[in-house]
Image (spheres, rainbow, N blue to C red):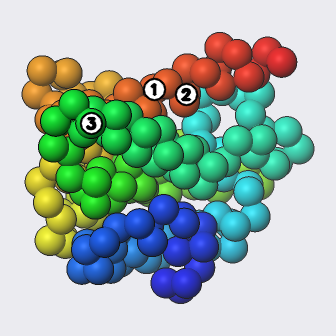
């Protein structure tokens, strides 16, 4: 299972702290095991990255997948943090990669299958993925800024309470969402 997770999320290999990398993989394993989804589902491109843009799913196939989104947000966050670090921001890149990679892990618990489609389940309607992902991550020894980014990357957290690392993940996530919603869906 570890090799499959590493293949799905190749930037995990860039986490130099092997303990943190292992923890991120364990969080993915546990979340997949708790969810209705399997690694086969993640690899098959059937889970959309959001249910808020209906045009992203065509004939049961996600045009932009949960895995694509996770990888693209991680790439964007790395670019932003690298630029900020050139100016002395001091963002820990291992923590950043872990946080960006895990930011939407809770969607596997927020979503379920219904009539062959991916839908938001009752748990997801009540708690949403930021809380659900952070709840799994709290069982592990993750740095607090990683935990905050999982919980705080979305609209639920006020911006002034976010660490710089959390803000980078938030901006990367919303840039990706907004670009797809406003531009790519229309093309």
Front in this rendered view, residue 115 or 81 = 81
The residue that label 3 is drawn on is 86
- Vertical order, 3 against 129 (above or below): below
**Residue for point 24% across, 80% down:** 19
Instruction: Provide the secondary structure element on which disc 1 rests.
Output: helix
Q: Which mark is residue 177?
A: 2
Q: Residue 114's spot in the image, x, y percent?
A: 67, 52
**Residue for point 46% across, 48% down:** 74
Residue 127 seen in the current view: no
Mark 3, other Cα within 10 Å: few <14 / some 14–19 / many ≥20? few
Q: Residue 130's spot in the image, x, y percent?
A: 32, 44
Front in this rendered view, residue 105 or 17 = 17
The residue that label 1 is drawn on is 174
- Vertical order, 162 against 11 (above or below): above
Return the residue found at the far front: 86
**Residue for point 14% across, 71% down:** 141
Looking at the image, residue 2 sits to the left or right of residue 47; the answer is left
Tell me whether the residue at label 2 lies in contact with that at label 1, contact meaning CB atoms closer than 8 angstroms: yes
Q: Residue 33's spot in the image, x, y percent?
A: 46, 76
């Amino acid at each position: 299972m570890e090799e499959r997770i590493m293949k799905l999320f190749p930037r995990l290999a860039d986490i130099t702290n092997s303990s943190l990398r292992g923890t991120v993989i364990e969080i993915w394993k546990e979340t997949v095991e708790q969810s209705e989804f399997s690694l086969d589902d993640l690899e098959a491109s059937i889970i959309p990255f959001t249910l808020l843009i209906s045009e992203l799913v065509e004939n049961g196939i996600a045009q932009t997948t949960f895995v694509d989104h996770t990888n693209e947000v991680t790439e964007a966050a790395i670019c932003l943090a690298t630029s900020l670090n050139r100016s002395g921001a001091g963002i820990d890149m291992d923590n950043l990669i872990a946080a960006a990679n895990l930011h939407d892990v809770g969607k596997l618990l927020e979503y379920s299958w219904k009539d062959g489609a991916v839908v938001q389940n009752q748990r997801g309607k009540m708690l949403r993925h930021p809380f659900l992902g952070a709840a799994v991550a709290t069982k592990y020894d993750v740095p607090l800024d990683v935990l905050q980014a999982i919980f705080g990357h979305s609209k639920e957290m006020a911006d002034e309470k976010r660490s710089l690392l959390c803000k980078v993940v938030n901006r990367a996530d919303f840039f990706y969402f907004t670009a797809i919603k406003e531009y790519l869906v229309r093309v």
